Image (cartoon, rainbow, N blue to C red):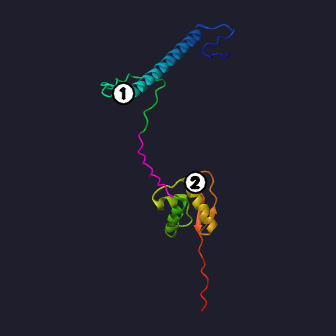
Amino acid sequence: MNWDPLCYIPDTNMTREEYEERKRRIDAHHRFSTELIEAARQQELRALDLVWMTTAEGPFGRALPPMPLAEVILLPASPPPVARVVAAPARRRQRSLRDLVSAVLEILPGIAEPFDRNAICQALGYEPDRGTLFRVFERLVEDGSIEKVTRGEGRTPSQYRRVEVESAPVVE
């Protein structure tokens, strides 16, 4: 059985101040719990109203005005959230592995070395599927088009560089 430290009474004699303090704590705990339960009830009712307004059938189903929101008090009060402007990520294009390999080979000459997946995504103008891009890098390493300079670890991506193809000397 768990003992609530707010209600625990030691075997020693208690002073009037200790008694009053414990009583205040118990009352404060009760008020806080009651307010939390009421806030949860209000949230459930709002969710139910929202579902009703969006799915109800009949002449009044979608024409009902929203219910006025009751003021909810939660203790302790938290500061209002800071508004952040976040740019929407570019939508991923679904491409086959072959198409992505071709696209990466086309942009490789214009990328500074060493490069990583972030530089490739920036040059492509979108972020391909993470696993597909990993397979592209594996295939290009196997083909000898690029080589891995450093292995990625954690949030640090692997770095690669182009492999210069030596042409055979021209025999005359």
Amino acid found under the numbered disc labelled 2? Gly
Residue 37: give x, y in percent of width and height.
49, 19
Quadrant assignment for the N terminus: top right
Type of secondary structure dominating the magenta stretch: loop
Task: Give the x, y percent position of residue 118.
Answer: 52, 57
**Image quadrant in which you'd find residue 59:** top left
For residue 113, above or below residue 165: above
Q: Quadrant of the C terminus?
A: bottom right
Residue 93 inside the magenta-drawn segment: yes
Is residue 17 among the parts visible in the rendering?
yes
Q: Which residues are magenta?
A: 83-95
Q: Secondary structure at mark 2?
A: helix
SS for callout 1: helix
- Whether residue 147 is visible here, answered yes or no, is no
Query: From what the image shows, is residue 2 above or below residue 137?
Result: above
Q: Is residue 158 magenta?
A: no
In-image side of 48 versus 101 (left or right): left
Give the total number of marks visible in the rendering: 2
Marks 2 and 1, how far apart in space? 42 Å
Q: Residue furthest front?
A: 58
Q: Nearer the viewer, residue 77 or 121?
A: 121
Q: Is residue 75 left or right of residue 169?
A: left
State the residue lying farthest toward the right.
Answer: 11
Marks 2, 1: nearer the viewer: 1
Q: Give the residue at mark 1.
A: 53
Q: Position of residue 20 (x, y in %)?
A: 56, 10
Q: Residue at x 42, y 33 (%)?
A: 80
Badge 1: how crowded within 10 Å, few (<14), some, or many (20+)?
some
Q: Which disc, if any, is residue 131?
A: 2
Task: Inspect the image, locate mark 1, and give the three-letter code of the amino acid beneath it.
Answer: Met
Residue positioned 41% across, 28% down in the render: 51
